[in-house]
Image (spheres, coloured by chain):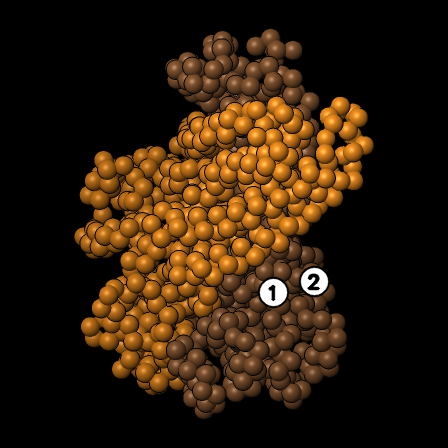
Chain colours: A orange, B brown
Amino acid sequence: MGELLRALEASDASALLAAAQDIHYADLAALYENLDDEKRDLLVKTIGPELATDMVAELPDTLIEDALNHFKPAQLRVLLGNLSDDDRVDVFQVVSEEAQVRFFSLLGPRDKELTRNLLKYEEDTAGGRMTTQIGRITADMTVKQAITVLRRDRDDAETLARIFVVDIQGRLVGKIRLRDLAFSTWDTPIGDIMDEADEYVLATADQEEAARTLSKYDLVVLPVVDEFHHLLGVLTYDDALEILQEESTEDIEKLAAISGEQSEISYLNTSVKLHYRRRVGWLIGLAFISIASGYVMFRFSETLEKAFVLSLFLPMVVAAGGNSGGQAATMVIRAMALGEISAGNAMRIAWKEARTGLFLGLSLGVAIAAFIALLLPQLQQGTGAAFDFPHLAAAVAVAITVQVLSATVLGALLPICARAINLDPAVVSSPSLASTVDVSGMLIYFTVAGSILNLH
Amino acid sequence: MGELLRALEASDASALLAAAQDIHYADLAALYENLDDEKRDLLVKTIGPELATDMVAELPDTLIEDALNHFKPAQLRVLLGNLSDDDRVDVFQVVSEEAQVRFFSLLGPRDKELTRNLLKYEEDTAGGRMTTQIGRITADMTVKQAITVLRRDRDDAETLARIFVVDIQGRLVGKIRLRDLAFSTWDTPIGDIMDEADEYVLATADQEEAARTLSKYDLVVLPVVDEFHHLLGVLTYDDALEILQEESTEDIEKLAAISGEQSEISYLNTSVKLHYRRRVGWLIGLAFISIASGYVMFRFSETLEKAFVLSLFLPMVVAAGGNSGGQAATMVIRAMALGEISAGNAMRIAWKEARTGLFLGLSLGVAIAAFIALLLPQLQQGTGAAFDFPHLAAAVAVAITVQVLSATVLGALLPICARAINLDPAVVSSPSLASTVDVSGMLIYFTVAGSILNLH
């Protein structure tokens, strides 16, 4: 890494090439991201299309087109031809339309057809992420015939960890391990040593569902089929790792009201402008929602004026609702993402959260009531407020119990309702929920306190 | 699945056994989780130790000991012997001390030593998750000799996707693909076809770091070595998938102030008591922190009484700080989890967030000021407040800008400081940050509004 940077600094092409050959393409891509334009140009021109192929496949989406534009058409033809078919489709999915047309014209006839077929599938489906370069044999072959076929395709096959067995119509009928091929006698029929291929996924399935299936069944590759069970390709474990990391980053960001697709560019390399763009929308939206809480507070100004001591516990009641609602929403959203619960479970979830919320609310209510009863009378002189502390304790305790109970149930049900009407549960969640719960907190607090303390 | 449930319902042992043989162990484990005690007993007793082995390895930690206690010692001996060595260690790591001793006495001498060696490593390190059942050959062997050795170990080797080459002292010197073995002539020396094993991880490394290394370099298996470069075992891609899913669930839960290790039991199967326990601590803690905000509000009661219209925008200023601070904290925490930034970058991060926060604050300030200037005069009659609206707009806009700017910088720096003093950045984050920022929001708002509107 250090050598490569020194060679770049010195513009020493031969040292640069030597250093680049010694480095893993993932590291090369990470390094490329941190360079300025001039150094990027020097780097890709020096290492050439052969060495750049794997690096380009690892780059963040937004940097790919720019990286490819450093090459002349003849070099680009080599690079695009070298890409594995799923990486090539990824490239076409992220570049501009102009570049799509230009790059497409550089492909060989077979790659053109392959790319066209794969581009049919949405980027975030199993079909959009699969590779079609897999070992395919039929059940009536012998081990020797199978090895001959696979050896011919060897350079093309991205993974031989699993080889799939298809019938003459190309439908998936079984799978076999390379180790079973390697360790069996040459005249064994494939049909004798193949296993059933019970786990597979439709090409139109969501990429996250496909990745979780692969993970659940501990598979290296998951076959992707069409609706007639034709074997189209496979999703590999490294695709699954990437998908799950992308999806969990997205989920985490949505919970914090950060919008837009995750850029794949690292935090430090993301511009202030992009950071701003991803956050400003929700921030302004949520700010205006907060005016509703302000309005409730303003309406109850008389209540507050009569007993200003109520302001001591107002933020607590409001925040407790936001926190408990956020906890419930997060648990339910994560469980939905992991496929553990669905809209059909809504009643069971509501019941579970209602009990949890009730116990949480009561605990909080008792804790606060005890705090007020024990400590506040001593502060009474300090504040100069002449007040009925048992009633104040009761008012705060009841309000916080009701607030936590209702926020918990609301927090659990909101993501389920969102999913039921096809909205993203993670987006309709913690921050937007918190703003909603703020309003109910104000209302509950002033209403409960107003009645118990006789302030209306 | 349906068949198995029917057989369980009817207590039909032979149908149950047949159905269980047809089902994937991951599905069997998911099903077991949902059964009552009586049916769990029937299931494990019917399928016996052989079939139960893989299922037990897939169960949530908290259910493992109970599941094993259904077996007689002789059966348990078989089951424990059948477990792969990493799964066996996982079992010993999660059961009670009493069970540890009892189970250990059932192991064969080789398994005893293996287990004792693996138990040295913490559960969440590469060493604690690795398997030691791997193919090991030396560079001076021929392909034929290597295949003979590997065939002998075949049943023991959990993965042959990568075979590692060691020297006579057992130090890692290279790696080789099974496909290269299978497709090379038998007299080829291993040294000619092996690759360098550049990627490896220390046994004491954190499991998440190991999983990310495997993912970054698209490896099926990552070798685990000790400080003298002796090959101890490997971490496989399915371990990595599991680790990354566990860790992101934990990160998401921490951001929502849910404490304790993720239970692995699905949401619906987690008891109300456990849901309660994981949430109540933070909820009460955060509630008491909120009293600080209440105290600030109470102290500024005079300011508020003089201009009750200020209450309309109080929740907005406070919430904007919580939201913008939460966004910044989440981005930084996620970037740290992905290894993109470290404490050394603190100044660069602060500078980036200061600029982002300034633009966010200004945008929000301008939006709110425009809203107040345009719409509020019409509401003036409604509220009966006689007020200087340009000054009010200025006060709210300045306060919200200062609040968002300071919350953004604080949100970004807090996780970095937490990491620097070895606290968990995700725990010291969004919710606790929000409570802190609430206080500063109240202070900023009342101070700014008080000066601009001349209320002191």
Which one is in front, B150 or B167?
B150
Question: Residue at image x 48%, y 24%?
Answer: B360
Residue bearing the label numbered 1: B130
Compared across the picture, whether B172 is left or right of A270 comes to: right
Picture quarter containing residue B5? bottom left
**Amino acid type, residue under disc 2 in the picture:** Tyr
Question: Residue at image x 65%, y 27%?
Answer: A307
Crowding near the residue tagged with mark 2, few <14, some 14–19, many ≥20 C-alpha atoms within 10 Å:
some
| Sequence order check, earlier mark of 2 and 1 | 2
- What quarter of the picture does the C terminus of chain A occupy? top right
Residue bearing the label numbered 2: B121
Compared across the picture, whether A378 is left or right of A6 comes to: right
Compared across the picture, whether A53 is left or right of B112 comes to: left
Picture quarter containing residue B366? top left
| Distance (Cα) linking label 2 and label 1 | 10 Å
Q: Does any portion of residue A23 appear in the rendered image?
A: no
Which one is in front, A428 or B374?
B374
Question: Residue at image x 25%, y 50%?
Answer: A119
**For residue B352, above or below residue B259:** above
Q: Does any portion of residue A436 appear in the rendered image?
A: yes
